[in-house]
Every structure is written in C-alpha cells, then in structure tokens.
Amino acid sequence: MERTTCCVVGGGPAGMMLGLLLARAGVDVTVLEKHGDFLRDFRGDTVHASTLRLLDELGLAENFAKVPHRLLTQIGFPAGPETTVGVDLSGLPGPHKHIAMVPQWDFLDMIADAASTEPTFHLRMNTEATGLTTKDGRVTGITYRTKDGESGEIQADLTVACDGRRSILRSALGLGIRSWRVPMDCWWLRVPRHEGDPIGIGGMIGSGRMVVYIDRGDYFQLAFLIEKGSDARWRKAGLQAFRDSVAGVLPWLADRVDAIESLDDAKLLDVKLDRLTQWYSDGLLCIGDAAHAMSPVGGVGINLAVQDAVAAARILAAPLRRGTVTTEDLAKVQRRRGPATTITQGMQRLMHDNAVGPALSGRVDLMKRTPLALRLLNRFPKLGLIPAYLVAIGFRPEHAPDFARR
C-alpha cells in the first residue's frame, strides 16, 4: 500500500500545474499519467496571456522562452461568408499582449522539469487510475494499473481528478452533471503555411461549413467544424470531397489541400459542453475538464484548467500540510472558480446559438444574421478590447501564490 498526501490523476495542464504548485508548498504530491509521454497532437496548444503572466510569477519565463512557440496578436472571428471581424490583442493590460501557440507536450515537459526539482513531487508515467477506494463514504485514494499490468493502490488525504471530460473518477462517484446541446464536432488537421499567408487566428463560414485557421509558423492548424454527429457522413463522402470543402471555405488554401493525404489526418474532437453541479465529494476534488468540459470556441479550456489548478493550490496547500483538508475547503475551490466557468460557458453557448449553429445548419443567411456583437466590433474597433480580454485573460485570472513564486 503506497501513500501520498495528494494524489493527482491526469498529467494534463491542470494536473501538472497543480502538482508543481503543491510541491512548491511542501506538500507530498503524486501525479499519475496513463501514457508514457505527453506526445499527443491537437490537444489544445494555446497558452493565454494570463497563463504567460503566471509563468513569469513562477520564475519560468526563461524556460518557456526556450520552448518552440509562436506569439499571436490577432484573432479573427468568422462573421459570415467572406466576412471576418478582427480583434487586436496589442491593447491588453499587462506584459503579455498576445497568446502563445506551443505544442502541449513541450509545455507539459517544461512544467514536469520544473516540478522534478521539488523533493515532494512524484510523477508516475504509464500509470492509469482504475477506480477509487473509499471508507465510510469518504474517498481515501485510488486503484491503479501500470502499462506492464501491475496493479496497486495509493492512499491519499486528497485525490484530485484532472483526468479530462471522460473522467473515470467523477463517473465512479456519480457526481451530478449539467450538459448543454452543442451544434458541432470538430476535425483537427494541418496544412502548410506559405509566405504572405494571413497571420494570427482567423476563419470563415461557408455553406454549412466553418473553418478556423491557427497560424503555427510553417503550418496552419485547422479546425473544420461539422454538424454534431456527422463524422461518419463526412468520412463516407471521401477525401476529395473534404479537400474541396476546405478549399471552398478558404480558397487561398486550394493550392495545398492535397497535403491532406488521408481522412485519418483529421482527428475528431467530440465536442461537449457540461459542468458538474458539485465539483467535490469528501476526499475528492474535480478540476479542469473533469469538472467542466469546454467547447473549443475561444480556445479557453486550457486557460480555465490552469486557473483552476492555481486556485486549488492556494486554497488547499495549508490544510494539506496540516492534514486537515475538509469538504468545506474543497467547496471553496468551486466557489472561487465556478462563476468564471459559468460565465465562460454562457458566452460559448451564445456563440453556438448565434454563429456556429446557424452556419453549420445552413438554414439562415448569415449575411443578414451576423450577431450584433460582431456587427458592433466592425463598426467600433476599439470595442475589440473586450473580446480580446475575455479570450486572452479571461474572467477572474489567478496569480501564483507567494509560496510558489521564484
């Protein structure tokens, strides 16, 4: 029987950040990651301005500068056929007037390297949590299985579920969840980028299609939005039909869609929008996607997950050190982070209902139904600071606690 003070399940942005911060507080923390590395493509590569500021506060700015990344200062919101509303990030408050695009595996490796210098941090790769252990209704730890087939248990004063939108830990407790219908799924893929192509993030709406492009330097990461549940239909139509669809929405990509060699190059994201009604139970806390699955609209999921981790570390570090963590301590995390989640998801639902859904259904003429907010941005560009702030910084951004600063 192994033991740790805090067992964090999931080595994504929320789990790794929480592990680093708690270790810097002197808490014995074990992070479990079921894979042998962090190399998974299209897992959200956006590092927002508020997260960049957090890295500064943690003394990791120099480390991040060494990681290959691209800074983007422009965001384009698709507003109709051949219409994009641009938002300039250069007016943001604070030192980072941009967002950074960085392969998530490089970001996670950087956090893991920083955490490895802390004597109370332990990272267990190739180790998958398989369930919870309980006693008298309280979660007391987890069961696990390694890649080699070994199994065991880890006892913990607190278990934190950071294992994503399909969290087995939240499912094991049957925590209540509220879900909303979403109009789309998303295919992620990449095509070459040429000199003179658009910079930043943009997109366009076509007939029943929407494509968002993300400037990654020598290539574009594309989000091809399809109607919810239509993956099989699109794949049945074949590769050339898909290439033609991409070129039909973004004609300037027509000369390179042949780089899409197979529909296997398109990775499906089953889009969900939900959140737990209660993020915790006695001995267990859910944060990040395990507490609230976000739509890819705005690319804010990673930022919210990191902010959850910072708030959780600040609130829980002292009671974890004392061995006195209670459900009321866990409730404080939800009270801190819940409002930001609710507001952000509300904005995503508005975008689903007023832009994405109508675009993919093809039932309305978007040129006549461009959302009011986007029309106002076109007319009064200075209003762009509002969506710039909401996307790049977000509601209630968190600062590094004093014990974690270097």
Image (tube, rainbow, N blue to C red):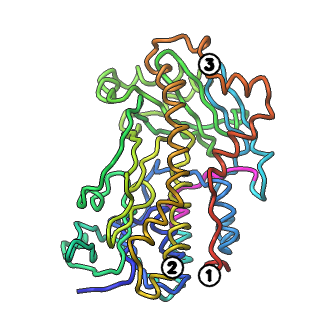
SS at mark 2 in the image: helix
Q: Earlier in the sequence, mark 3 or mark 1?
A: 3
Residues under labels 2 and 3: Cα distance?
47 Å
Q: CA distance from mark 3 to mark 1?
A: 48 Å
For the C terminus, give its image quadrant.
bottom right
Q: Which residue is mark 3?
A: 370
In this view, the residue in front, 325 or 354, is 325
- Left or right, 39 with respect to 402, comes to left
- Residues at circles 2 and 1 in contact by the CB criterion of under 8 Å: yes
Q: Secondary structure at mark 3?
A: loop
Give the quarter of the image for residue 263. top left
* Position in image of residue 6 (x %, y %): 39, 78
Describe residue 162's horizontal placement relative to residue 405 as left or right.
Answer: left
Task: Give the secondary structure at mark 1.
Answer: helix
Task: Check disc 3 and give the amino acid type.
Answer: Thr
Amino acid type indicated by mark 2: Ala
Seen from the viewer's position, the closer of residues 194 and 176 is 176
Q: For the residues marked 2 and 1, what is the alpha-carbon distance in whole angstroms? A: 9 Å
- Residue 48, percent across and down? 63, 53
Q: What are the residue bounds of the magenta stretch?
A: 97-108
At 50% from the left and 69% from the top, the residue drawn is: 312
| Residue 106 magenta-highlighted | yes
Along the polypeptide, which appears first: circle 2 or circle 1?
2
- Label 2 CA crowd tier, 10 Å (few <14, some 14–19, many 20+): many
Please name the residue that numbered disc 1 is placed on: 403
Return the residue at label 2: 317
Q: Are the residues tagged 3 and 1 within 8 Å (C-beta)?
A: no
Could you tell me residue 334's position as x and y percent?
47, 60
Amino acid type of the residue that numbered disc 1 sits on in the rendered structure: Phe
Observer able to see residue 268: no
